[in-house]
Image (tube, rainbow, N blue to C red):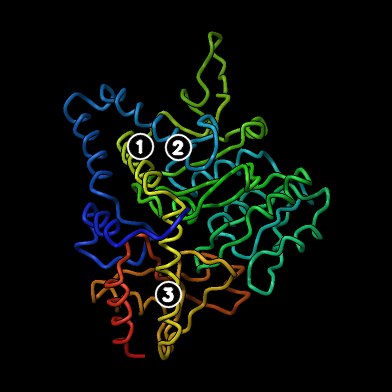
Amino acid sequence: MSSPLSPATVDALRARTPGVHTTTHFNHAGASLPSAATLDAIHAHLSREASIGPMEAGAAGEEHTERARTLAAQLLNALPTEIALTTGNSPGWGAAFAALGPWRAGQRILVARHEWGGNLATMRHLAQRAGASIEVIPSDASGRVDPRALEAMLDDRVRLIALTWLPANGGLINPAAAIGQIARRHGIPYFVDAAQAVGQLPVDVAELGCDVLAGAGRKALRGPRGTGLLFVRQDFLPRLMPAFVDTYSAPLDANGEPVLRDDAARFESSEASLALHCGLANALREALEIGIDNIRAQIDRIAQTLREQLAVMPGVSVLDQGIERSGLVSFNVAGMDALSVRRSLAAQGITIGSNGVAYTPFDMTNRGLAQIARASVSYLTSDAEIDKLLAGIRTLKH
């Protein structure tokens, strides 16, 4: 049974995280703070490269790469052959989308209102030149994507359903599994952007019913920046032809012809940072040891406490929608733009995020929001840090 982490456990985790001693960090949704062990794993491989040569150190790095792949598969309830290690969420998602092949006039892509702006840019760049359309699935009264509205939109021209599970501009959690049931029933490819979910929520790709799922290493997983995970369902893989291959993803046969790998590593390259893979492997190990259910319970407790205290603060509007919520807490301060709020808090040693329309253009436009301030928590976040953030907001001149 899952439960929030004990104060002693949190203290021990914080003691093994150098960054908590130098900053009050509320931008875990941008990038979280790595543990000392994750940093040590990266440094150890860099030292091997410096000592015996980068290529010669490759064998040890490859071992950690495969360990990261195996641990990622465990985290997502997938097969190791269904996992590609990428350089980030967007590169993985974009590579899988590009691998769908050319689009035709009249084909449709259905997205939730909360779709990540980077994904929308990728879709528009490739699809709209061919005359394909991107259409928004309506949301329900809580703000979440509405599965019933999605089903009413379906026809034989729908080629893809894309969902950002946890939006970048607030705490809403979309019903990803309910969308997946509809996609599977109608045989429509289903891509899930799980950048904010992986490491924060339990993720079961079988339960989600997705064909592709992308995640980031630098966010809730507390892995190094420049790492990501890409799940591709094994029986969906033959439908994807990568736009770029090399001697790792498609080695040449005896006749000099490229032979595309038959696993998700067809989306990898021989030119990868093995040091970062070492760090990612350690971050995955730590998350699994703590327990994702326990992480979820702890983050939920902390985020709910922060929301409740912000909601009663004069001049502060909490903007989170949905029924079930994540560790992203969005708010605005009356009379101040979000960037000024972020800069003023940074001057006090407190880091938060601030998002504009480009992050989630459909949702921000629909709700009449030009910007939001975002305080995102981790299971590392302490009550003292929440008190410091609230005190910092009270000092703002608005």
- For marks 2 and 3, the one nearer the N-term is 2
The one of 66 and 266 positioned closer to us in this rendering: 66
Q: Amino acid at mark 3?
A: Ala
Q: Quadrant of residue 365?
A: bottom right
Where residue 312 sits in the image (x, y, percent)?
43, 87
Where residue 40 sits in the image (x, y, percent)?
22, 41
The one of 334 and 106 positioned closer to us in this rendering: 334
The residue where tag 3 is placed is: 373
- For marks 1 and 3, the one nearer the N-term is 1
Q: Residue at x 56, y 19 (%)?
A: 258
Q: Looking at the picture, does residue 340 appear above or below residue 195?
A: below
Q: Amino acid at mark 2?
A: Leu
Q: Amino acid at mark 1?
A: His
The residue where tag 2 is placed is: 85
Horizontal side of 250 relative to 341 (left or right) equals right
Label 1–label 3 contact, CB within 8 A = no
Q: Looking at the picture, does residue 111 appear above or below residue 256?
A: below
Where residue 108 sits in the image (x, y, percent)?
75, 53
The residue where tag 1 is placed is: 277
Task: Determine the CA span between mark 2 and mark 3.
Answer: 31 Å
Q: Looking at the picture, does residue 20 appear above or below residue 141?
A: above
